[in-house]
Image (cartoon, rainbow, N blue to C red):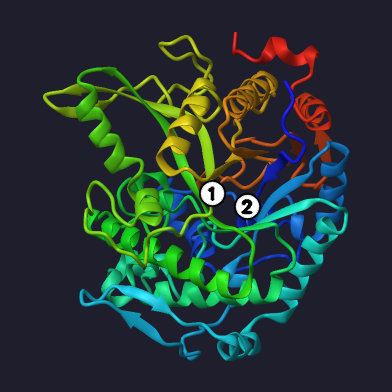
Amino acid sequence: MKFPKDFMIGYSSSPFQFEAGIPGSEDPNSDWWVWVHDPENTAAGLVSGDLPENGPGYWNLYKNDHDLAEKLGVNTIRVGVEWSRIFPKPTFNVKVPVERDENGSIVHVDVDDKAVERLDELANKEAVNHYVEMYKDWVERGRKLILNLYHWPLPLWLHNPIMVRRMGPDRAPSGWLNEESVVEFAKYAAYIAWKMGELPVMWSTMNEPNVVYEQGYMFVKGGFPPGYLSFEAADKARRNMIQAHARAYDNIKRFSKKPVGLIYAFQWFELLEGPAEVFDKFKSSKLYYFTDIVSKGSSIINAEYRRDLANRLDWLGVNYYSRLVYKIVDDKPIILHGYGFLCTPGGISPAENPCSDFGWEVYPEGLYLLLKELYNRYGVDLIVTENGVSDSRDALRPAYLVSHVYSVWKAVNEGIPVKGYLHWSLTDNYEWAQGFRQKFGLVMVDFKTKKRYLRPSALVFREIATHNGIPDELQHLTLIQ
């Protein structure tokens, strides 16, 4: 079970979850930083009380982690840049031309050479140079790097979630609810492409934008900023994030010839009972709204075509962890508990699949089915950019890893252009509102000493990476028993 010669095998990470951990590595200038430090959030149980400054310390220990990744056979990493590290202070005063259509939508943001030079005067050069140093260390080893520009935290000057909660979004820096964020994100994206364009083999504008607007404004008990319940706000944030992706895409292309994509949180939607036509319409509106628009320029909900949003997708990053199971009752989809993301932590689903420490059902078949469906829908190259399991005992991870890689191999073997598999993640990390409770690493981290310890699953990963596929000795793990 071999992959093509140029197949990318590695891991993904994010700045906020991995960088801090050693004094001097903190970034206190983001919305997520103030959110997890807020005593009211901790008292309400919205956040764990764990703090990112006690994290794995990649900012200082990047060479150690790169050494470890090399030993495990990693050829590609997907990493990020933290917007608030680069621009801890506002960039509003760098004015750029903004074009709107007759409906007031932002259809063009023109960030030229002079604008990025002015942005360079405002940038935190120490942070910029450190990112270049970190990622050059990896690239100069002859390995590949995918660079993602946004993985949830916003600069505090753009979004203050505590003020939004107390005063409302009309009286506080409201992040993606404000169209200024579209323009500022385009400027930031242009600057990073201008400054770091030689490092990545490809770009991603955003990671999981759907999680940001759903968890921030709809499912507010999940502990995501700003915890402001408003379906109208969720729609507005989604609209602005779609425009921000498209305008960032345009401006990255101005300074880089590398492919530009989007990384999205997908699940396999499965119908247990009811009419398929009702379910398919629901799935299109719920799961594919964002990606339909940035690929096709319209969606099942927004049928009006927007040329300025279409064809802004050179490749698609697929983050897959589990499924969602539904039945249709009176033409309405009802989600079923006990399956997918709605399981008992450490339990067994009704389908007799094991569930992770997070309560997520292990369902590798869904990844194979999803990859097929996504390619048929969009026709672009795919990369599995996140896939992993919270498993402190490392009891599930070896078989989880092999069975999901097998699902990728099946798709590739059927001609679907899946170009890589990136595990989440190399080391244990700071899991947002959950803190350090969830253990996703192939490598265990002692957060007090920062020492790394290989879990048995890391050795399984090494066999897959060094063989560029699943060796015969591991093929018995291709299906979860």
Say which quadrant the N terminus sits in: top right
**Mark 2: which amino acid?**
Gln
Q: Is residue 157 above or below residue 1?
A: below
> Local crowd at mark 2 within 10 Å, few (<14), some, or many (≥20)?
many
Q: What residue is shown at x 62% (from left), y 20% (from top)?
A: 403
User: Picture quarter containing residue 268?
Assistant: top left
Question: Which sits in the foreground, 33 or 154?
Answer: 154
Residue 17: mark: 2
> Local crowd at mark 1 within 10 Å, few (<14), some, or many (≥20)?
many
x and y percentages locating residue 62 in the rendered image: 81, 55
Tags 1 and 2 touching, CB below 8 Å: yes
Q: What residue is shown at x 48% (from left), y 72% (from top)?
A: 185
Q: What residue is shown at x 51% (from left), y 60% (from top)?
A: 32
Q: Which residue is mark 1?
A: 432
Q: Is residue 435 above or below residue 159?
A: above
Q: Left or right of 430: which side holds 326?
A: left
x and y percentages locating residue 273 in the rendered image: 25, 16
Numbered label tally: 2
User: Picture quarter containing residue 85?
Assistant: bottom right
